[in-house]
Image (cartoon, grey):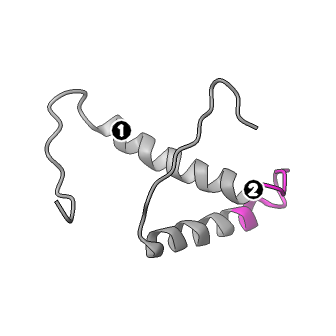
Amino acid sequence: MLNEELTTQTFVVPREFADRLELHAFQMIEAIKDEESMPADNQLLQVMSYILQTAVGMYLDQQPGDGIDRPDIAGR
């Protein structure tokens, strides 16, 4: 359930990326299923959210606050 501190975001990603993320999330769920109790109704979304927040958080922590270099993004 969302509250004042949570929001949703939608991204367009290549199918291969989405498949890799889902597979890794399923593997994490299997690895922790005996150790932690997580509601079964949305475990996949919770784990994928954790993976993305961790990865993006690390990326943002490593970027300077100003002077961001132009990224080399395909299709520009």
User: Is residue 45 shown in magenta?
Assistant: no
- Counting every numbered tag in the picture gives 2
> Residues under labels 1 and 2: Cα distance?
25 Å
Report the side of 69 relative to 27 (left or right): left
Which residue type carries mark 1? Leu
Quadrant (top left/top right/bottom left/bottom right) for the C terminus: bottom left
Residue in view at x 76 percent, y 54 percent: 42
Q: Compared to 5, does 37 lie above or below?
A: below
Q: Residues within 10 Å of mark 1 (few under 14, many from 20)?
A: few
Residue in view at x 70 percent, y 28 percent: 3
Which of pointers 1 and 2 lies earlier in the amino acid sequence?
2
Q: Which residue is mark 1?
A: 60
Residue in view at x 53 percent, y 73 percent: 19
Start and end of the magenta stretch? 29-42
Q: Which residue is mark 2?
A: 43
State the residue lying farthest toward the top: 4
Q: Compared to 40, does 57 lie above or below?
A: above
Tell me residue 59's x, y (percent). 36, 44
Report the side of 43 relative to 17 (left or right): right
